[in-house]
Amino acid sequence: MSAFKVAVLISGNGSNLQAIIDEFETDQSIEICCVLSNMKDAFGLERARKAGIKGYFIDHSQFSSREKFEKELIEVLEKYNVDLIVLAGFMRILSKVFVEKYIGKLINIHPSLLPKHKGLDTHKRVLENNDVYHGVTVHFVDNTLDGGPICAQSKFEVKTKSIEGLEKRVHELEHIIYPKVIKEISQGRITLSEGKVIKI
């Protein structure tokens, strides 16, 4: 049985990428086949290189449209015949065409308990809102901002007034939950059917 092929899209440091690499380093059933970045100096590309994973830098600023940039992404992804695309700090909004091509095979992680606090500055907004809980959400990507069907969430009680403290705790949860969801999708235990998440 061939390995479940995962592509990871990044723009920066790649700490979630590292957590995924570490989790599946000795798991023959999952292969991180490639890492794509729109930023040349993204440290995640170095993480991929060190792990022996093929990395690609595709500069979005060199394309006249979002669609032309994404066509280049798709060419790489098709080459590897990927089973799942994981967004791990990829700071580009994907077009409707790209999202619909990979619907059910495209996931993202967001630093809040969706549907609360979509978009940016989630830690700041949690503190301003005096939220009792904060956390992370893994969801399938659709054509809404951070609004796709939810695969899993993990939360903690807010006991600090520090944005940095919240960020650290959220990163810890992200590094646990993202590999876990990837594994469950690879096993067919989480799937998307008619816009709804099915869990087995």
Image (tube, grey):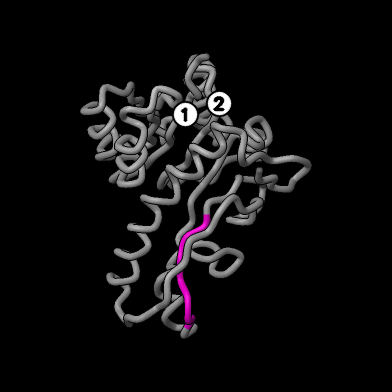
Task: Name the secondary structure under disc 1.
Answer: strand
- Could you say where residue 92 lies in the image, as x and y percent from the top left? 48, 44
Q: Which residue is mark 2?
A: 83
| Part of the protein shown in magenta | 131-137
Residue drawn at the location 50% of the way across and 24% of the way down: 4
Q: Taking 48 as reference, is 180 above or below it?
A: below
State the count of labels.
2
Q: Which residue is denoted by mark 1 in the rendering?
A: 6
Quarter assignment of residue 140 = top right
Rendered location of residue 1, percent (x, y):
52, 14
Query: Is 27 drawn above or below residue 87 in the view shown?
Result: above
The answer to which of 61 and 124 lies nearer the viewer is 124
Name the amino acid type tagged 1. Answer: Val
Q: In the rendering, at what x and y percent does residue 70 appear?
A: 53, 30
Real-space Cα separation, disc 2 to disc 1, in angstroms = 6 Å
Residue at 44% across, 51% down: 177
Quarter of the view holding residue 121: bottom left
